[in-house]
Amino acid sequence: MQRRDFIRSSAMTAATLAASRLAAEESNAGDTPREVDGVHFQKAPCRFCGTGCHVQVGVKGGKVVAIQGDAKAEVNKGLLCMKGYHVGLALYGKDRLTKPLLRKNGKLVPISWKEAIDTIAERIQADPKGFAMYGSGQWTIPEGYAANKLVKGGLGSNHVDPNARLCMASAVTGFLSTYGVDEPAGCYDDLDNCDVLITWGNNPAEMHPVLFSRVMDRRSRGERVKLIDIGTRRTRTTEFADEYLEFKPHTDLAVANGIAQQLIERGEWDREFVEKNCAFREQDEPATLNGKAMDFEAYKAAIAHYTPEKVAEISGVPAEKIRMLADLFASKDLKITSLWCMGMNQHTRGTAINNLVHGVHLLSGHFGRPGDAPTSLTGQPSACGTVREVGTLAHALPGGRVVTNADHRKQAEDIWNVPAGRIPEKPGYHTVEMWKRFSTPKDTGGDISTIWVQVTNPGQTLPNLNQLFFPSRKIPGKFLIVSDVYPTATTEHADLVLPSALWVEKNGVFGNSERRTQQWFRMVKPPGEARDDCWQLIAVAHRLLELGNEGMKDRDGKFIFHVEKDGKAVPIWDFAHYYDVNVDQHLFEEYRKFTRLKHKDLAPYEEYTKARGLRWPVVQQKDGSWRETKFRFASFDDPYADKSRPIDFYHSTTHDHRAQIWFRPYEPPPESPDKEFPFWLCTGRVIEHWHSGTLTMRIPQLRRSMPGSYIEMHPDDAARLRIANGEKVLVESRRGKLELSAWLNGRGRPPRGSTFIPFFDETLLANLLTLEDYDPFSKQPDYKKCAVRIRKIG
Amino acid sequence: MSVSPVGNRAWQLGSAGIVAIAFVGFFTGLKQSPEAAPVRDTQELEQPADPTPSYGDLRTRDRGALGDLHPSQVQRFADAVDRTPPEGPASETDFVGAVAARQETRAYWGAPPSIPHRVNDSRAPDCLVCHEKGANIAGNLAPRMSHPRYDSCFQCHTLSQDPRTAGSQGISPENSFDGWKSPGHGSRAWQGAPPTMPHPTRMRETCISCHGPTGKVGLRTSHPERQNCVQCHTSSAALDQRSTIGTPPTGR
């Protein structure tokens, strides 16, 4: 229907109309492949970001030869972005890793898989508590689940943490401390219904392009959508914005508080919504995630400080713009969606700013109607599915459970059928702590001796690499294992490198930003001896069993990854037999048992093979069909919400159906520009490259479009330092230095005193400069601000 | 020449009336004019006018391939497109050449083409200036968009040149991807039957983008006067994702 309207409004020829009507209207349900001209097409979610577009992968002669946007996918409705259209090329870079490599006499030399698996198992067996697993939001759900089970259920250790700690941990703590349960209540349908879209430190035009155009294309259809960009530098998103509000780095807390202050002062907050559904909260001493209750009068007194003038003074956003934002939130007839991603999450006050944006929506009642939603986006394809839902964090267990809760541990031990007491109560090391201990000698507290990295690139993406990554490479006894598909900034320094299968070279399941679980099947074979990450985990577990590790047995003495077919055990640890069964399906069905507790119900694996993803909770209907949930807590849609009230926060931290509106004061950042280091540095991404560029830098079309990193600065600052466009500069922070070229009036435009460096380029490591300081609750570091100085070279 | 006093009087009265109406009209107009005047965008008022650039600025300022064109110039580009229909069906040589040329800017058949010219990377794309209707810039044809209007052009279309430095080619990493190629012609049931569409219609809804005057020689239709292409040319249900075959996979 939308497509038809669109077409009508865009004044095209009759030829056009007739053709597109054919393309758009006829669709048949079904999941069977298509074949055209010998090319076999099947569905898969895109390998890149957290948007979770579906693509149609065209395979011919055992190779991927084409990609189409999947017309049946609700997320992207047949469209993709430049990365999605070229995702198939990611498989075919010339330097794919095809053999296990072990460092001998300083050089990586090819070894057999048997030697590789033996080496890992022997290292773990020698020091199980000194072993840590560093995973990823790019792990598939079965991979992350297997890793979690191997370490927590098998080795009895909680040292599993993912790169998603660096990516969305503050969104998690924000949701938990506000609603008592993780992940957004709304979904992408809000983007089709909002009247106002507010991007908080967010550049979706480049980072979530398909979602961005899903909103902006509504304008081409004649709809009015107001875009308000609240940011620290002008970006491609700003180009589409009706209002651009530029705040001084870190002062987004003041901006959010300013809106709340205005709503309260003018009496324009939504009394009915708040009285029925909300309570007020503030920090306790010592600080805990859930804080302590405060009454409305205390909240009112605390927030009164943030007058528009005061906020203008702190943030640099003019007072009338704060009033403008308050006007919008005070209008009940408008529907407002907020989007955020790394800007709010990579923040030493990340939990606090997440709380405040939820708070503004709750206080104004802009919540729970389609189009009224505070929605965090994720950067990785399965940060939600594998990390947040499977619980591959050092403190978590599957299905929203935590290791510190005795009931939760017992439930996990029962489902895994492992002896009671197997899972330790104490959380394992979070990412920064894990790598700090790996980079510290054993006799001075560095009790992590072996780290196995899968599907991520910490040698490029950890903050402050000189502190967290490089020292370990010089300490005797530290062993770094890396599973990846290409040589990276991490494999370069690894002791053991394992070649992995990538994307459609294996079966997989991802979970995207809108609670959508998406499945795909293996379509082509991995190159050389590259093998599935999940197989690698199971093979190591089985080798440990052979070495006599009792943790690898369940209560009945069976292997913890025991899989049967026709009543017989299948030796899935032997790669020749790994695809005798669908291991993903077995792991997924076991994992499903965990998902009911927090009402994150998943459907059977089979259902996902038919659908372009389903949003949880997916609940079985009387007729046997499975129904997904678009709007959580809203009783018109969420089957778990109490039907007697419009909104039901049924996981409330205070067990009274209420969400928490927090008072969170603005506090200055840990490092600000000063005389010695006078510039702000922000790091981030560009549209062409995804994450550390391992895949996208090997795709000619993307690399040609953006070949290397640079520093953006304001032309006035550049003129003062006599730096012209393209000239080499030296950028130094208190932690490291980097030489790169300046790009003035480029794609992004920082204000005076601010600079920006993208982190995709492995030859120009932005994280030599960044700060490892993190949010006290989420332990997520701040990549968005630190102080640097800049000097022209030569 | 005698003028009837009555007539004269009537004329005088009439004139007075007209003058009076004009007066009322004038003052009403005056009164209304402040409201009727277009209200300037507040944002526009806040932004100071661009100062004259210094030579230093000119060195660093990237004005894109087309710079900031005057609208009349844009119109001239659109007018420069030769809309004379071809005299007959294209030659096979021209057709093969056109298909090969298309392949050069695409990773595979069906991929969005990369942008073969410089663009201003710092602004919202002004691609539509030329590509909404098609243009001829000094002999270079800017094809009309093949798909409905989407505003975020850089979402799908990559640059083929390093945007940071003028004109320099980026590095092309080695990649053994061997993309799907166009099958060429559609099929004909008999000689003289209208050919089927050999490509999907998705994102290629505007036939005249390639088959009209801004398309490549070799692809242009010999009968542009016929507006309803799908009257005769059938599309492919399989290419358009409207049909499936085979049995569901199992992942084993």
Image (cartoon, coloured by chain):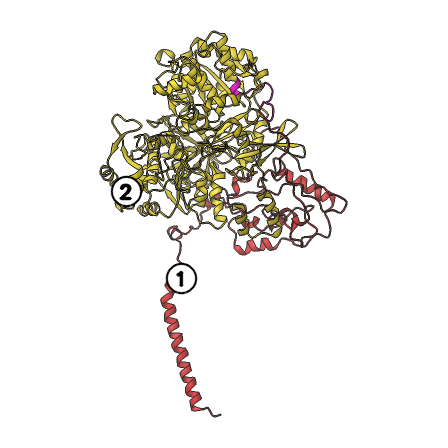
Give coordinates of residue A464: x percent, y percent: 40, 25
Can you give x and y, in whole percent of width and height, for residue B226 in the image?
67, 53
Percent position (x, y) of residue A755? 40, 36
Q: The disc numbered 2 marks a residue on which chain? A: A
Do the residues indicated by labels 2 and 1 lie within the same chain of the protein?
A: no
Chain B shown in which color?
red
Q: Is residue A509 visible to the viewer in this orientation of the structure?
A: yes
Count of numbered circles on the image? 2
The vertical placement of A115 against A678, above or below, is above
Name the residue at 46% across, 26% down.
A386
Q: Colour of chain A?
A: yellow
- In the structure shown, which secondary structural element does the residue marked by tag 1 occupy? loop
Q: Is residue B63 above or below residue A164?
A: below
Q: Secondary structure at mark 2?
A: helix
Quick one: quadrant of the C terminus of chain A?
top left
Q: Residue at left 39%, top 13%?
A: A422
Give left or right: position of A160 versus A349.
right
Image-quadrant location for residue A770: top left
> Residues in magenta?
A523-535
Q: Amino acid at mark 1?
A: Ala
Q: Which residue is mark 2?
A: A261
Write down the residue under mark 1: B37
